Image: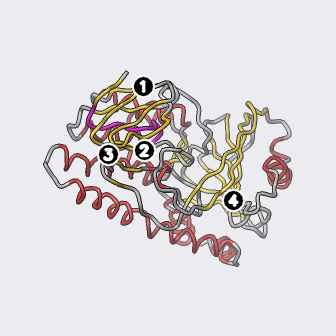
Amino acid sequence: MTTKTDVVIVGAGPAGTAMAAHLGQLGIKDVVLTDKHDFPRDKTCGSGVSPKGIAVLKELGVWAEVEPHAYRIEGLRLVTPNGQERYLSGGVKAEAVVCQRRILDHLILKRAQAAGVTFLPHFQGDALIEERGRVVGVKAKDGREVRARFTIIAGGTHCRLVREKRPRKLIQAIMGWWEGVPFRSGYLEMVFDKDIAPYYGWLFPESAERVNIGITYEDLDNERNARDVFKRFLERQYASRLTNAKQIGAWKGHPIAYSYRIGHLTSPGYMVIGESGLLTHPATAEGIYQGMKSGMIGAECLRDVLSRGADEAKALATYEKRVRAAFQASFLGGGVFRALVKSPVLDWIVKTSERPRVQSAAARVMASM
């Protein structure tokens, strides 16, 4: 069972669906998008979409569908490692939103399908198909093949189809969902607890009744038990607010991979986008915006080859160059921010944030990282 197409995309998360939808916008209709699941499907994620992510959704023409399902975030509760806290507001409505991945990914997928993209669910990519040094498609575990002029890998952090395994660092994450937790309407929370610094814990409201609470932390020697770390965090930071709350489902955890350096994302007939290319923010672990943006950049470079006759090697090199321009400075800045978390800087922000200009600037910086 073989399908032939111009572009096959493996993975229908934000990166893969955004690329597919944008290819359709650009007039490239012969596109096959695959995923090991059918949609809608749940995805373990904090589900926060930054201001930059909202801008990408608007470019894709899907924001009008997403907005009714998204919880609007207008401010931030910031807690420093020394326990000082402040509510910060950027002064602009809808600085960010929280939208469950079950909804977000499905809406972008539907936009891609409306643009002519073919979706193949239950397709678990098992191996790349290579001929004479070129990737020419992907084979599923059940034997199905999709052969294409270009094969795009968007299968997430641990996708086995990534050809060149680069050095990477891991962030551990675990989270849960509750109803009935008191919180300030329109505010998300970032808690820089000493036990998990330089990373943080969070409370993201998904609706007026439901929140997700989680933590990210490093465990370089693989010695810490995620459930124990999370339990202690909840006891220190949220015990009183969880007293009368109802937990929804089980806690879920997953590792997130990142790298400060960007590169090795292409080869003949092949491109990596999103988390598969380690395009995850080193300080915040955000990947939704980076995934969607890299997918759109990739789509535009493929359009140049497929519709405009551009040289393939030059177009692939342009993709890597544009991705570095989009994310490299922010990733390196994430390294600086990690160091600042263990310094008095966050405490200084809290102390000086009574001034409206400082408060607004701090909220915007935190929201746009």
**Residue at horizontal 26 percent and vertical 52 percent from the top:** 301
Labels 3 and 2: the sequence-earlier one? 3
Percent coordinates x, y for residue 46 in the rendering: 61, 45
Magenta stretch containing residue 120, yes or no? no
Under circle 1, the secondary element is loop
Is 196 above or below relative to 47?
below
Under circle 3, the secondary element is helix
Circles 3 and 2: CB atoms closer than 8 Å? no
Residue placed under numbered mark 4 in the picture: 200
Q: Amino acid at mark 3?
A: Glu
Circles 3 and 1: CB atoms closer than 8 Å? no
Residue placed under numbered mark 3 in the picture: 59
Disc number placed over residue 144 in the picture, else none:
1
Labels 1 and 2: the sequence-earlier one? 1
Q: Amino acid at mark 4?
A: Tyr
Under circle 2, the secondary element is strand
